[in-house]
Image (cartoon, coloured by chain):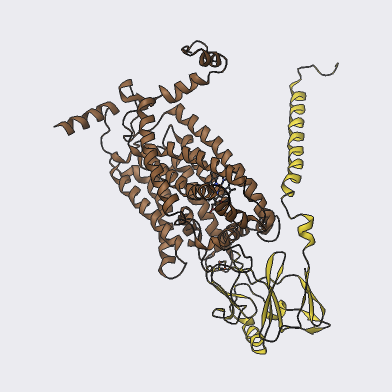
Chain colours: A yellow, B brown
Amino acid sequence: MSSTTPSDPSKRDFIVLTGQAMMGISGALFAWPLVHSMNPSADVLALSTTEVNLEPITQGQAITVTWRGKPIFIRHRTAAEVESARADDGADLRDKQTDAARVKSFEDKEQSQWLVVQGVCTHLGCVPLGQKPTDMKGEFKGWFCPCHGSHYDTSGRIRKGPAPKNLAVPPYQFVSATRIKIG
Amino acid sequence: MAHGERTPFQNPVIEWVDQRLPIFTLLNKEYIVFPTPKNFNFLWNFGAIAMVMLVIMIATGILLAMQYQPNTMMAFDSVERIMRDVNYGWLLRYIHANGASMFFIAVYIHTFRGLYYGSYKQPRELLWMLGVVIMLLMMATAFMGYVLPWGQMSFWGATVITNLFSAIPLVGEHIVTWLWGGFSVDNPTLNRFFALHYLLPFVIFAVVFLHVVALHVVGSNNPLGVEPKSKADTVPFHPYYTTKDIFGLTIFLIFFAAFVFFAPNYLGHPDNYIPANPLVTPAHIVPEWYFLPFYAILRAVTFDISIPFTHIVLIEAKFGGVLLMFGAVFALLVLPFLDRSPVKSAEFRPMYKIFFWVLMLDCILLGFAGAKPPEGAWVYIGQAATAWYFIHFFVIVPNLHKIEKTLPLPDSIDAAVRAAQAHKAS
Ligand code: HEM
Ligand code: FES
C-alpha cells in the first residue's frame, strides 16, 4: 500500500488487460473441443482400412469398392491402356504426374497393370463414369464425369474440363501379389 | 419504462397484465395505431406474407420432426412412411416442401420491391442488411432441409455444395472433412444437418424480430420514396393495412394451395424419390429453383485466374466460382453504400428504372443458365449474365447519380395522392 496509491491508473490497466487476455485465451481453448467434436469420430476413423482380393478381376475389367464411404476404382489395365498412359507422360498435363508415379510395386516388381484411384471427381465430387463396359469413358478413354464434363485418361489424370487435379490415388499397398490393403 | 404514456385499458385483466408487463401497450403502439404511409401498393404485402410462411414452416417442420428419422438407414423410408402411413403426413410434407418455394417467392419479391423503391437507402441501411442476413440463413436452412429426405438429389446436392469449400486454399480439405464429420457425406453429416435445420429457423425468427424492430424505428418506405412529413401522409396500421395484408395473404395462400393440392411435385426433382446411392451420380444435378441463379454464377468461372503470361495460378476456377457466388450476396449487403443517389424510388429515376428491369431479366436469365447442363452456348450466356450482375452493382449503381437527371419529387405523399385522385376524377 505504501508504494502505490489505490488510484494508480497503470496498475488498473494492467489488471483489466490481463483479465481480458485470460478470458480471450480460455475462450479460444474451450472453443476447440466444441469445434473438434464435429471432426470424424473414433468409430468413423476405425473403418478406414479395406482389403481387396484382385484375383477375380480379369484384364480390361474394373471394379468399384468402398473405402471410407467413397468409391474406389480398381482397374486391371490392358497393355494398350498402360502404354497410352505412359505415352502421354510428356503431354501438356494440368496436374503433372507420370503414370509410373501413380501405380505401386510388389516385391520390386511394378504392378503397372493395376490402377487404384478414388472414384471422386476432383471438381465437385461426383462419381465419374467409365467403370462399366457400356459407360462413356470420355475423350481420353479413362473416365468421364457427367456433372460438369471432366475427362480423365487411362491413368486417371485430368485432361479436359473444370476439375483441377488428377483422380487421387488412395493410400494402399500390396499385401500379396493378388491382394491390396487400402488405408 | 414509459409509465406516464400508458393509456389504461377497459378490460380489467388486460389492464392488470399491462400494468406489470406492457405488452398490450406495445402491440397497440406497433400494430394498431402505428402510423404507416397511406400509399402502399400490393408489393408491400410480401413482408407479412414471408412472416406467415416462416410460421407455417416452423409449425409443419416440428410436426414432421416428430415422425422423421435422421439416420441414413431410415431417413428415406421414414419420409415415405410420413407420406403413406402418418395421418395427413402427405399434407404436412407437401406443405413443408412447397412452402420452402413459396417462402423464397415471397422473400425474393419483397427484396426486388426494396431494390425498385430504394428501401435500402438512408435511414434503412441496417434494416436492409438484416434482410440480406435473413436471406442467407434461409438459403442455409433450405439447403440442409433438402438433404433430409436422403434421396439421390439430397445426397449429391449435399456432396457438390459441401465440396465447394474444398476450393479454399490450404485448409479447404480439412474444412470439408469437418463439415462432413467423416470422409464423405454420410450419417454424421445427416445428423448435424438435421440438428441445424431445426435450429436455424429459430435464428431466422430472432433476426426477423430485429428486422421488425428496425422497421418500426425508421418507419416504412413507400412507392414514392418520400418520407411522411405530416399526419396527412399516414394512416393507422389497423384496420387499413391489417385488412390489406389479409387480402394479399389470402390470394397468396390460394396460389400456395394450388401447388400443394394439384402439383405437389412440380417444383421438386423426380430423382429425389430414388434413395441416396453414394456410388452412382445422377446424370444431371440441379438444385432447387430458388438456388439456380446462384448456381449459374458459381459455374460461370470455368478458367483459372493466373498471373498473365505465366503458369502461376492465383485463383483456381473452382475457388473463383465460390468467391463470385458469395460476392453476389455481398453485393446486396453493401448496396446501401454503393448507391449514392439521394432519390429513393425508381419512379423518379428514369435511368435506374431501366437498369432495374435489366437486372431483373438478368437474374431470370441466370436462373435458366443454372438449370441447363453447362455445355455450348449456355456457358457463355451464364458468364455474360454473371458479368452483368456485378457490373450493375459495382459499376452502374455507384456512378449513375452523376449522369442521371431525376424527376421532380412530390411535396408530400398526401399531395401526390390528391393529385392522382384529381387526375382520375377529371
Ligand atoms: C426457414 C424455414 C424452413 C425451411 C426453408 C425449410 C425447408 C425444408 C426443405 C426444402 C425440406 C425438404 C422437403 C422435401 O423435399 O421433402 C425440408 C425438410 C424437412 N424439414 Fe424443413 N424447413 C424449414 C423449417 C423447419 C423446421 C423449423 C423444422 C422443425 C424441426 C423442420 C423440419 C424438417 C424435417 C423433419 C424435414 C424432413 C422431412 C421431409 O423431407 O419432408 N423444417 N425443410
Ligand atoms: S464434379 Fe466432375 S466435373 Fe464437376
Q: Is residue B419 left or right of residue B93?
A: left
Q: Residue furthest right?
A: A2
Horizontal and vertical percent position of residue B102 = 45, 47
**Which is nearer the eye, B5 or B244?**
B244
Q: Is residue B407 left or right of residue A12?
A: left
**Can you say whether B347 is above or below A58 in the image?**
above
Q: Quadrant of residue A130?
A: bottom right
Q: Residue at x 70, y 69 (%)?
A: A66
Horizontal and vertical percent position of residue B17 = 55, 16
Q: Is residue A159 something one can see in this rendering?
A: yes
The number of numbered badges drawn on the structure is 0
Q: Quadrant of residue A174?
A: bottom right
Q: Quadrant of residue A7?
A: top right
Horizontal and vertical percent position of residue A50 = 77, 70
Horizontal and vertical percent position of residue B352 = 33, 45
Q: Residue at x 34, y 42 (%)?
A: B401
Quadrant in which the N terminus of chain A appears: top right
**Which is nearer the eye, B281 or B162?**
B281
Q: Residue furthest left?
A: B426
Q: Is residue B306 something one can see in this rendering?
A: no
Q: Residue at x 55, y 78 (%)?
A: A138
**Which is nearer the eye, A95 or A5?**
A95
**Which is nearer the eye, A148 or B404?**
A148
Quadrant in which the C terminus of chain A appears: bottom right
**Can you say whether B404 is above or below B182 in the image?**
above
